[in-house]
Image: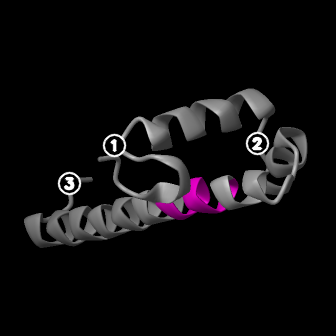
Amino acid sequence: ANKDADAIREELRRIGQQLAQADELRERRGKVVDEARAAELTQREIALLLGMTEEGLRKAQKSYHGRGRSYGGRLAS
């Protein structure tokens, strides 16, 4: 069944909001993982606490740091 245009617009708005929240969570995760590493938590422990594999965590942090950030989430100069 086809949805009417207003229902589709509302669904798109909700999806956009959820994606923005997901981006914010990824940003927070990157920052807190850096803090955890500075506090000497192991990669394995951090991954377990996040429900991720170690490889998934490494990739996530590489992506986080690859977006113009240096250690601690500050913009690289």
Residue kind at label 2, given as amino acid type: Met
Q: Name the spot of residue 76 as percent of width and height, x first.
A: 35, 47
Give the numbered dot on residue 2.
3
Mark closer to the observer (1, 2): 1
The three-letter amino acid code for the residue at tag 1 is Gly
Q: Residue at x 68, y 54 (%)?
A: 33
User: What residue sits 76% from the left and 42% below the top?
Assistant: 52
Q: Disc 3 or disc 1, which is closer to the eye?
A: 1
| Amino acid type assigned to the residue bearing label 3 in the image | Asn
Q: How many marks?
A: 3
- Image quadrant where residue 55 sits: top right
* Residue range of the region highlighted in magenta in the rendering: 27-33
Distance, label 3 to label 1, CA atoms, is 43 Å
Which residue sits furthest front? 77
Residue behind mark 2 = 52
Give the side of residue 31 with respect to residue 33, left or right. left
Q: Residue under circle 1?
A: 68
Mark earlier in primary sequence (1, 2): 2
Task: Determine whether the residue tagged by mark 2 lies in a helix, strand or loop.
Answer: loop
The location of residue 5, given as percent across then percent down, is: 9, 64
SS of the residue at dot 1?
Answer: loop
Q: Quadrant of residue 56?
A: top right
Q: Earlier in the sequence, mark 3 or mark 1?
A: 3
Q: Please provide percent x and percent y for residue 48.
A: 87, 48
Would you say 3 lies left or right of 54 here? left
